[in-house]
Amino acid sequence: MIRVGVVGYGTIGQIHCDALGNVPGCELAVVADLDPARRTQAQKDFGVEVANDIEEMLQTTDVDLVDICVPTYLHEQVMVKAMEANKHIFCEKPLARTLEEGRRLVNLSAGYSQKIGIGHVVRFTPAYMGIRQSVEQGEIGQAGVVRTFRGGSQFPEGWQDWFANFDLSGGVILDLAIHDLDLCRWLFGDVQRVYAKTSRGRTTAHLEHAMIVLRFKSGVIAHVEGSWTNFKGEFYTTMEVAGTNGLISYDSRTTNPIITMAVPEESMQVGAVAANPYVLELQDIVQAIGDDRPPLVSVQDAFGTLQVALAALESTRTGQVIEL
Amino acid sequence: MVVKVGFLSLAHMHAYSYGRALNNLANCTLVGIYDPNKERGIKGAQEMNTRFFGDPAELLTQVDAVIICSENNRHREFTELAAKYGCHVLCEKPIATTMEDAEAMIDACREAKVKLQIAFPVRFATPVMRVKEMLHRGAIGDVVAITGTNHGQMPGGWFVDPVLAGGGAVMDHTVHVVDLIRWFLGQEFVSVYAEAGCGMLWDVDIDDCGMLSMELEGGTIVTQDPSWSRPRTNPTWGDVTLHIVGAKGVIDLDAYAQNFVVYDDAQNKVSERSFAEDMDLGLITDFITMITDDREPSITGLDGLKAMEVALAAYESARINKPIALN
């Protein structure tokens, strides 16, 4: 039984703790959070041990896998501590806030004896797994032009409102659109060049809309759109892949088999299918440990996606096309 | 006053819809059709219940106004000819294929004191007009970002001839969305970046995929997808959509959403049927009342030129892989 320690009990940490309950072969052993109220909440929610931070967690509790759910700018330091303790690691996306942090993690992870997986959860989302399979099987011929959208809901809530601090979060491109940048890399390979625009700076920090135009080495043209808006609305995602023989079209708004109006607290369904992507991504790392195989998303792979997202940020800053 | 109207060329299929509109309106009459393609002209004249003219001059002496539905690169010669005969002009989009031609058309009409209107019928779609009104009264606050699409199926014919059309998907499908945004916000585009690809989806030697990323003078960021990316099995020809993000709200506009779906086993085909009001009828009504009321065109030659300028800049950007600044 793999004992898991979750570091960070914010929005994503709570989702991971929930998901771990459905992953065979592991158990949630401990939750670390700097906030005493969150620690109390974790105890109440899961009846597990708690710790102040990763150091205390590693001293007091025996864990095999450290699941890092802290804000992006803390990923590197927490992951380094987990590596010093020689633990298996699962870390939320993005890999890191900066290229330097990412590069250091790539170097440290080369030759590391334990498993490290990065939480690009979209790769574990059934709709996208299905789309990838269709593309790979050539159902629509050669892919030519691609569109993705992600967003539409309210601005994310985070510890000390860190999402609103660009230096800490990287804004909507590094936190949200990166899902689709990773997805597009997974489907269409290496990116040749990036040109991106963001509304950041023209509105309050709690609204950002970004559009990223990508050209892949394969020739594929993609438009990736990420939206943090502070209006009332459901989160949704869309994807379209046009190819020489047809078109794949997906819209999460039209694929929900249950629509409720009377019971608001039940209206948030996690996806339209039984398989929960958070369960699947954590199952992947647990199985990777058991089977001694690499997890689906390696540090190196996540670094490739980070490079594209940071190139997009560079483009928004300079107004120039960034070649990769 | 009954406005006498003629067609100069039926090369663009919008002519048939405009012809129906002319036949449905009381204050105008369709006098006839000149088409350099005689066979097409005769057939079109039969369909529209009007006369075919083998000589454009003969038609032009009998009408007050013409609708030009020729190939894009011939808009200039037909506009200049109409102006010479003192006829008002409704010209299909894009206005032309070069800046020089567009400027010459505007000059010719101004000098001849005839009105030049460009056919951007989407302005007359009811949902589009409603969104303009919403933006005008500040329903979503200041607009900060817009993502547009004008997808289509590959139209074939002269549309894929670089000389006759002046470009492929980027030329064909950039101008509608650019025109709507200029009209909505009253601002000009100041920069254009574009990716474009030739023959990526279809067996054509012209751009069939593109992606434009632009900025307006007020700082609003805009992207536009003009790709001919709707497959043959698509239930409709394409779309015009705008996702408009403001400081206080978001509007999702799908100009052609008012459809029901027909599943037809006999034809082995699924298709969408519109129940929306006819935007082409709106355009033609506007053009005719412009003449009867003697007012300025609601869509000017300059509007046409500005939209085409963005498409031309997109081609230049795609060639050099750098954003292009517009004056």
Image (cartoon, coloured by chain):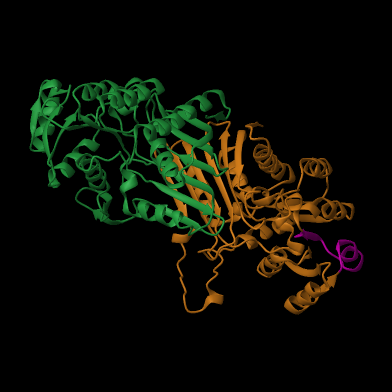
Does the stretch in magenta take in B98? no
Q: Is residue A53 magenta?
A: yes
Q: Is residue A17 above or below residue B273?
A: below
Apparent side of residue B201 relative to residue A273 in the rendered image (left or right) = left
Q: Quadrant of residue B324?
A: top right
Q: Position of residue A310 (x, y in %)?
A: 70, 41
User: Residue A136's x, y, as percent?
Assistant: 51, 42
- Name, please, the residue furthest toward the right: A59
Q: How many marks?
A: 0
Q: Quadrant of residue A155?
A: bottom right
Hue used for the chain lettered B = green
Residue sitting nearer the eye, A20 or B103: B103
Q: Position of residue A101 (x, y in %)?
A: 80, 44
Image quarter where the N terminus of chain B lies is: top left
User: Is residue B66 visible to the viewer in this orientation of the structure?
Assistant: yes
Q: Is residue A115 left or right of residue B197?
A: right
Q: Quadrant of residue A57?
A: bottom right
Q: Which chain is orange?
A: A
| Residue B68 appears in the figure | no
Camera-nearest residue between A232 and A80: A232
Q: Which residue is nearer to you in this view: A297 or B153?
A: B153
Question: At 40% across and 40% down in the image, what residue appears?
Answer: B179
Q: Residue at x 89, y 55 (%)?
A: A85
Residue B282 vertical placement versus A15 (above, below): above
Apparent side of residue A178 relative to residue B37 in the rendered image (left or right):
right
Residue at 21% over, 39% down: B291
Viewed as shown, does residue A320 lie left or right of A138?
Answer: right
Name the foreground residue: B120 vs A147.
B120
Query: Which range of residues does the magenta coloring cover?
Result: A52-70
- Residue B199 image offset from top left, x and y in percent: 42, 28
